[in-house]
Amino acid sequence: MTPCKLDVRPLLARGEEPFAAIMSAVDALAPGQPLCLIAPFRPVPLFNVMSNRGFACSDRALEGGDWEVIFTPVSAVEPGLAPGSASAAAFWPEPAEVLDLTGLAPPEPMVRILETLEAMEPGAVLFALLDREPMFLFPELAQRGHEWAGNLAADGTCYRLLARRGGDD
Amino acid sequence: MAWFASAILFLIAALGLMVAGAAGPAHWENGRALAVVHLFALGWLGQMMLGALLQFAPVLVARPLALPALALPALLMSTLGVLLLAAGFLALDGWEGGILLLEAGPVLLAGAFACGGAMLGGTLVAAGGWRGSEARVVLAGLAGLVLVWASGAGMVLDLTGNGPGQLIEALPLHVAVGVGGWLGLAAFGVSYKLFAMFLLAPDGDSAQRRAGFVLALVALSLVLGGLTAVLTALSARLAVIGVAVAALAAAVLYLADIRRLWTIRRRPQPEVNMQMSRAALAFLVLVCGLLPFAAAWGGRWAEAAVFAALVGWLSTLTLAQMIKIVSFLTWIQYFAPRIGKAKVPVVQDLTNAGAARRWLWLWTLGALCGTMALLAEMPLLFRLASLALLAAAIGLAAEAVAIRRLSHLSPDARPTRVPVILPPLAERRPRNDPMQA
């Protein structure tokens, strides 16, 4: 579903408080519709407020110091994704790298994924096919600020993983 | 991994006492022998299994561990509980002070098992683990743990003069559910996953696995029925025979299933841990061969069957996989953060595979000689076998410490920070939570 876009930069430039505008935009969302917020800073206090209202968020820095935050209603996360998957994965760009890591012994798949991600541009996405869920990879991805979304194929024979390179901070 | 360290110390203590002659052919019922048996079964294998399950329950169901804060109290209560129970058994040899310890042991163990059960059961049940072919076997193993504790605590009540008096009749059921119901089923569940991982074989259910699980449930129900019979002063003989038949069939189906995994593997040359796991499985075959005689005649046949199961099958399996798991987790701990930023060694570089293999062969030799000594009722051979087991255990413990300290790596491949021996008790898995990004 197309996210509802709200740019609060003009409001803030006029010295107005954007909170009410954001809340009325949230109230006007269609069921399952995400909200895409553009702000001149990373609106950290909002993350909690939105989390309490049942939204997961994913943010990225735009050029010129602005931030884009996508709030996705949690129920709208694609069904069947493994717990811990980033809710906004549906809005990620097409994968820039595709790795077939089936038939490799652990921890080789993890090594290949992390090495490839480290060489990619921030925000770029990698798709990997694995024999099983890479349990030890997830904490490492989170630690490095990368996001992921994955699930086991319906027949249980392989695991599909999308990982998005985090920003350099 | 603190569980592993504690377990290894119990193993060395138990084997040291066996070398000193605390137990041997036809000497398993005095206090010292019971202390040795419980140091081995509860302290070594039980703690090893709990520690391994805390690592692998999250892998089995792809969820973080529930209630990880309980890991430390569980380890402390379990360690202290085993020590008190073992010391308490000395009361049977005439040490008055032991009675109180014997009563306190099961209470602490109940606390430890409750904590362990809450973490493992909570993790597996919350994720719908009974639907998974591996996790549901582990859940059945946890049910076995409840039964082994209940039957053991009941016998302790009798021994300390607080029980009805006939509960000692439950001994065969207590041993059967301890070896097969708790440790055996937990080992089945973990090995399904581990073997598939290390052999690069596909995960997944099979007809043998489903049938084996049903038989395991039948065996556990028969144990429960037998224990009820003992409580009501009836004979548990029929239940013991039934448990043996069901356990034998479940073990044969398990072996068939592992054979299936072995034939569809994609790794042509298995590593040491899997080669030596074959030796462990050969002991399970031996146990299956001894089981009918053990159930029919008891005595030395039962001693040999239980020894072959605990020392030959379960301990060889545990020791072989321990070396692999310790090196894997150590590698993850030190080198996962460096991937893509610096050159990292391969996991195999952390281990001296040749040394591990030699110690594991010595272990299996000791286990085989010990089993033979029990069958032939040769106390001296049994002590020699125990000495071989002790040497192998110390060798493998030293190898585990060397792996933890990254001793086999060349100095330039080692991280600058000196590794600590023990990482956290239970690995916590951070959720991929953008709120904390």
Image: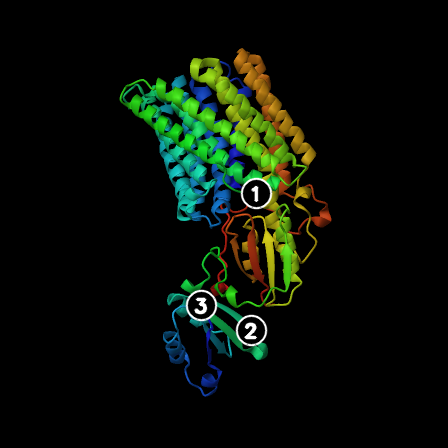
Where residue A58 sits: x, y (%)?
50, 67
Q: Nearer the viewer, mark 1 or mark 2?
A: 1
Residue B124 % position (x, y):
43, 45
Chain letter of the residue carrying label 3: A
| Viewer-nearest of discs 2 and 3 | 3
**Separation (CA) of disc 2 from disc 3:** 18 Å
Q: Amino acid at mark 3?
A: Thr
Pinpoint residue B366: horizontal percent, then vertical percent. 60, 22
Q: The residue tagged with tag 3: helix, strand or loop? A: strand
Q: Which mark is residue A98?
A: none
Toward the viewer: B75 or A19?
Answer: A19
Q: Is residue A125 above or below residue B182?
A: below
Residue at which label 1 appears:
B202
Asked if badge 3 and badge 1 are on a common chain, one would say: no
Cα distance in 3D space between marks 3 and 1: 35 Å
- Of pointers 2 and 3, the one earlier in the residue sequence: 2
- The residue drawn where x is 53% and y is 15% is B374
User: Which element carries disc 2, helix, strand or loop?
Assistant: strand
Location of residue B144 in the rendering, given as x and y in whole percent from the top left corner: 40, 32
Q: Quadrant of residue B172?
A: top left
Label 1 neighbourhood size at 10 Å, few (<14), some (14-19), many (20+)? many
**Rendered image: mark on residue A72:** 3
Q: Residue at x 51, y 43 (%)?
A: B55
Would you call the spot at circle 2 few (<14 residues within 10 Å), some (14-19), or many (20 or more)?
A: some
In the structure shown, which secondary structural element does the residue marked by tag 1 occupy?
Answer: loop
Where B24 falls versus B84 (above or below)? above
Q: Which residue is mark 2?
A: A61
Q: Is residue B184 left or right of residue A167?
A: left
> Is residue B91 something that shows in the picture?
no
